[in-house]
Amino acid sequence: MSDLVAELNSLDFGVYIGGPLQAAVQAQQASSMAAVEFIQEVGFEDNGSGGTQIRYVNFDYEKSTPNPDFDPDTAVGPANEKYIKSDVSLKVPFITMLTTPNLRIDTLDIDFNARLTSTETSNVSSKFAASAELGINYKVVNFKASASYQRTSSKGEKVEKSYSLNVKVHAVQDELPAGLDRVLTLLEDSIVSA
């Protein structure tokens, strides 16, 4: 009979369980590097002298604000409008308008099933055959007899192996790291309205 414990001990659990864990760590590292590349490519631009500067987006629009000198009893005219219109330019750091990719692996479930089935077979068969002939021919008697016996046996052992590996990964958009959050807050404070 096969030694099923030895069969199980021969499995390399480091590959079956460690492989998905290592892949998860590499995926987390790749996600972090993708965030760094995104910030570098989207948040900064060449300043023309070999360095980089923060990339801004400019918005120009017309803004209406209430006129503090408006008098409803006075005749309406250009000097006494209810709202004052002014042109405004807004300069916003581009990176503050986008969601920075920051994925985090939340859960990693590894299900590994090993099924070993050992079957031992034994077959024994016997076969007996006999025949006899009697012949009488003018005072001569002929008698023939034959017998045969055959026995066959076979033994076998069969081990069936079945493995299944199921890996479930759940990733979520993580909160911004504290340092990046502070930088983005500083950049939001640099929004200029003129």
Image (cartoon, rainbow, N blue to C red):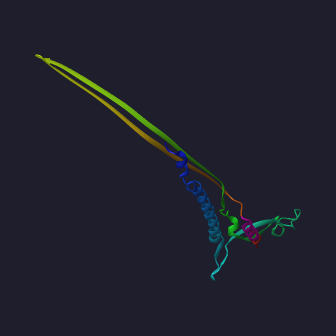
The residue sitting at 57% across, 54% down in the picture is 13
Q: In what quadrant of the picture does the C terminus appear?
A: bottom right
Residue 193 vs residue 42: left or right? right
Note whether 139 is above or below 115 in the view shown: above
Residue 8 vs residue 76: left or right? left
Residue 19 pos. (x, y %): 57, 57
Query: Which of these two is toward me, 144 or 190?
Result: 144
Q: Quadrant of residue 181?
A: bottom right
Residue 136 on the magenta span: no
Query: Which of these two is toward me, 102 or 95?
Result: 102
The residue sitting at 39% across, 33% down in the picture is 124
Q: Quadrant of residue 145?
A: top left
Residue 108 pos. (x, y %): 63, 53
Residue 3 pos. (x, y %): 52, 45
Query: Which of these two is toward me, 81 or 130?
Result: 130
Q: How many marks?
A: 0
Q: Main secondary structure of the magenta part?
A: helix
Residue 186 on the magenta span: yes
Most extreme residue toward the bottom, as rendered?
49
Query: Which of these two is toward me, 43 or 92?
Result: 43
Q: In which quarter of the image is residue 51?
A: bottom right
Residue 39 pos. (x, y %): 65, 69
Magenta span: 177-187
Residue 139 vs residue 49: left or right? left
Note whether 131 is above or below 107 in the view shown: above
